[in-house]
Amino acid sequence: DIQLTQSPSFLSASVGDRVTITCRTSQVINNYLAWYQQQPRKAPKLVIYAASTLQSGVPSRFSGSGSGTEFTLTISGLQPEDFATYYCQQLNIYPWTFGQGTKVEIK
Amino acid sequence: QVQLQESGPGLVKSSETLSLTCTVSNGSIGSYYWNWVRQPPGKGLEWIGFVYYTGTTVYNPSLKSRVTISVDRSKNQFSLRLTSLTAADTAVYFCARERVTKGFDTWGQGAQVTVSS
């Protein structure tokens, strides 16, 4: 299985901050990487797919980048509704796998 | 827009079989991949498998011996069957629609399943 390792696992930030989450994969995944946001007790919500394509309806302060085995999710200007847990997922080789999650909390 | 809704028992006994159904509304079950994902309490997401609308399936090898996912196009539903349950199967189970290589763009609200001894 392809392993996905997110860093950090936890980060504390303030409204307005720029935050970056990294996802490293154990193999090259041809940019078939998605990012999700999950609020407590809610289903995940797709934020980014194909490493850098913003899902329809998602604010433009979210952006994704990367290639090969290292990918990043950046939130430019953190808003109160962005405090959540974020997961990366690879969709290149079965089984689909997720990172362990990064929890973004209010400082 | 398309909506997904899981249904099934919230409490099942150890060694028994879990059956969950996901109903697709405001859209067709055709031309997409339909997935199941679970999340144990306080933990991350685990992909269980998917069924294509034609009935083709792919499962996570970690669960493959116990999982069956099927589709009923006439009812616009797909289902999960998980056998030989243990406490480790206690989780919230989500159904989700996948666009090929583009992630899971639509999710159900999740169904809490508790396995009791």
Image: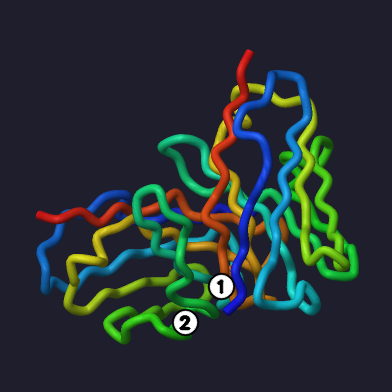
Kindly identify the amino acid type of the residue bearing the numbered disc 2: Gln
Q: Position of residue A9 (x, y in %)?
A: 32, 50
Quarter of the rendering occupied by the C terminus of chain A = bottom left
Looking at the image, residue B51 sits to the left or right of residue A25; the answer is right
Disc 1 is placed on an element classified as strand
Q: Marks 1/2: CA distance?
A: 8 Å
Chain assignment, label 1:
B
Along the line of sight, the residue nearer the viewer: A92 or A46: A46
Kindly identify the amino acid type of the residue bearing the numbered disc 1: Asp
Crowd rating for badge 1 (residues with CA inside 10 Å; few <14, some 14–19, many 20+): some
Q: Are marks 1 and 2 in contact (CB under 8 Å)?
A: yes
Residue B106 in which image quadrant:
bottom right
Q: Position of residue A4 (x, y in %)?
A: 51, 56
Along the line of sight, the residue nearer the viewer: B70 or A13: B70
Chain assignment, label 2:
A
Disc 2 is placed on an element classified as loop
For the residues tagged 1 and 2, is the chain the same?
A: no
Along the line of sight, the residue nearer the viewer: A49 or B10: B10
Q: Position of residue A92 (x, y in %)?
A: 66, 69
Which residue occupies the extreme top position in the image?
Answer: B117
Crowd rating for badge 2 (residues with CA inside 10 Å; few <14, some 14–19, many 20+): many
Tell me the tag on residue B115: none
Q: Position of residue A53 (x, y in %)?
A: 47, 85
| Residue that mark 2 sits on | A55
Residue A86 in which image quadrant:
bottom left
Q: Residue at x 43, y 71 (%)?
A: A71
| Residue that mark 1 sits on | B105
In the rendered image of this protein, does residue B9 appear above or below residue A57?
above
Looking at the image, residue A47 sits to the left or right of residue B52; the answer is left
